[in-house]
Amino acid sequence: MNTYKIVGVVATLALSAGLLAACGDNDDKQSNNNNNTNYSSKKSSDKTTSQRDLNGKSFHLSMDDAIKMFQDKNKEADLTSVKLEYENGKAVYKIEGADNMKDYEMVFDADSKEVLEDKAESMDADDKNDVQNDKINMTGIISMDEAMQKATAESDGAVTSIELERSFNDTVYSVSIENGTNESDVTVNAKDGSVMNVEND
């Protein structure tokens, strides 16, 4: 074979090998970039969830103080729901109650203690019949912090909301928990701290 032809073939093979290696490097870089993007997205999501984690957080306004502020304003109302959650970037208490005539709802900023919402609505006959069934028994209940600890011991993750409410004959805490893309709702008995139910989505 002609020497020039041999050199040409060798050069062509070397060039082809170089191109294939470059393509392989690009594919690896693209794969790494995709992995980094997925990791960054997950990390960002986890950070957002952790920032909204109510478990272990302390606020200037306690649940007991928020309830007292509600009862001072609505003296005849029975409590039907006490909820702590993040809304529009703020931790808020949403407290609901009712008497024989009206439903009441107040929303408090858990840090500034500001009243964000205060409303009352007249009840119809059906609502009046439900008041006694929805009334919360506050005697001897555990704290929200204790309920969150019980719930996260059963289902690990960030607590995004917790609500004190009536469920049949029991006063319970309903605790919503997020862990990555997994969500669970844990029901904790507000009297003895026992976990009554766990629902996973």
Image (cartoon, rainbow, N blue to C red):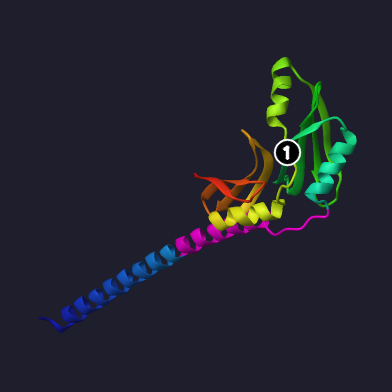
Q: In this view, does 2 lie above or below 159?
A: below
Residue type highlighted by circle 1:
Asn
Q: What element carries label 1?
A: loop
Query: Furthest-bottom residue in view?
Result: 3
Q: Is residue 50 magenta?
A: yes
Determine whether, in the image, residue 8 is placed left or right of residue 59.
left
Q: Is residue 59 covered in magenta? A: yes
Neighbours of disc 1 within 10 Å: few (<14), some (14-19), many (20+): some
Q: Which residue is drawn at 61% across and 55% down?
A: 150
Q: Is residue 55 above or below residue 8?
A: above
Q: Name the residue under label 1.
A: 137
Residue 71, position as x, y percentages in the image: 85, 37
- Foreground residue among 75 and 103: 75
Which image quadrant for residue 14? bottom left
Which residue is found at the position 72% from the left and 27% from the top? 132
Give, as a single range, the part of the protein colored magenta.
33-60
Q: Of residues 201 and 46, which is closer to you in this image?
A: 201
Q: Residue furthest top?
A: 125
Residue 193 in view (yes/no): yes
Q: In which quarter of the image is residue 75?
A: top right
Left or right, residue 175 beside residue 19: right
- Could you tell whether 126 is left or right of 103 in the image? left
Q: Where is residue 95 in the image (x, y as percent from the top left)?
A: 77, 38
